[in-house]
Amino acid sequence: MDNDLSAMHRQALQRQARARVDLLDELRAVQNASRRGLTQRETADILATSQAKVNRMLKAIERRNADLAPDPEEMILRAFAYNTPRQKLIAELKAFPYTFGQDAPYPHEGRLPGTWDRVVTALAQGLIDESEFNEVRSAIGR
């Protein structure tokens, strides 16, 4: 890929990362409004969106068991989308309390991913480079 196409590709990835981060921020805003006792209509008015979208977001929050705590994926997406200094990202990733994938319990098959899997995925997607990945991996003892 020449430099222009490479830059265009990076910009597209950054737009996608910003869209994902914006969605997480919007989910947190809906959760905050809900915890304050606002109706879906009131929440929609405050967030300049539709009541139907607020309803869908509340269902998404429920599916996540109301867990919207930042995770490695979000940290990496934010850093990539907004050009956060890489050393700041690496320090945050080193300090994160990771979980690791496990085999699914019987009678299910497959694997239940952990938060570390998000870092591995970010490497595969090119959101972090191999040296950054190895620095984090060695710091957490993997």
Image (cartoon, helix red, strand yellow):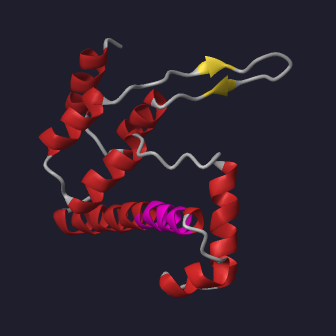
Region of the chain picked out in magenta, as a range: 22-33
Q: Position of residue 78 (x, y in %)?
A: 31, 55
Query: How many discs mark residues in the rendered view?
Result: 0
Residue most extreme to the top: 141
Q: Position of residue 57 (x, y in %)?
A: 63, 66
Q: Main secondary structure of the magenta part?
A: helix
Q: Residue at x 50, y 50 (%)?
A: 68
**Closer to the camera, 102 or 11?**
102
The image quarter in which residue 17 lies: bottom left
Q: Position of residue 53 (x, y in %)?
A: 64, 77
**Closer to the camera, 83 or 71?**
71
Q: Position of residue 92 (x, y in %)?
A: 25, 36
Q: Residue at x 26, y 27 (%)?
A: 94
The image quarter in which residue 135 lies: top left
As drawn, is 133 to the left or to the right of 119?
left
Q: Would you place residue 107 above or below residue 128 in this image?
A: above
As drawn, is 48 to the left or to the right of 22?
right
User: Does the magenta portion include 129?
Assistant: no
Quarter of the rendering occupied by the N terminus: bottom left
Q: Residue at x 31, y 11 (%)?
A: 141
Q: Residue at x 58, y 29 (%)?
A: 113
Quarter of the rendering occupied by the C terminus: top left
**Closer to the camera, 120 or 64?**
64
Q: Would you place residue 20 above or below residue 136 in this image?
A: below
Residue most extreme to the right: 107
Q: Would you place residue 13 above or below residue 92 in this image?
A: below
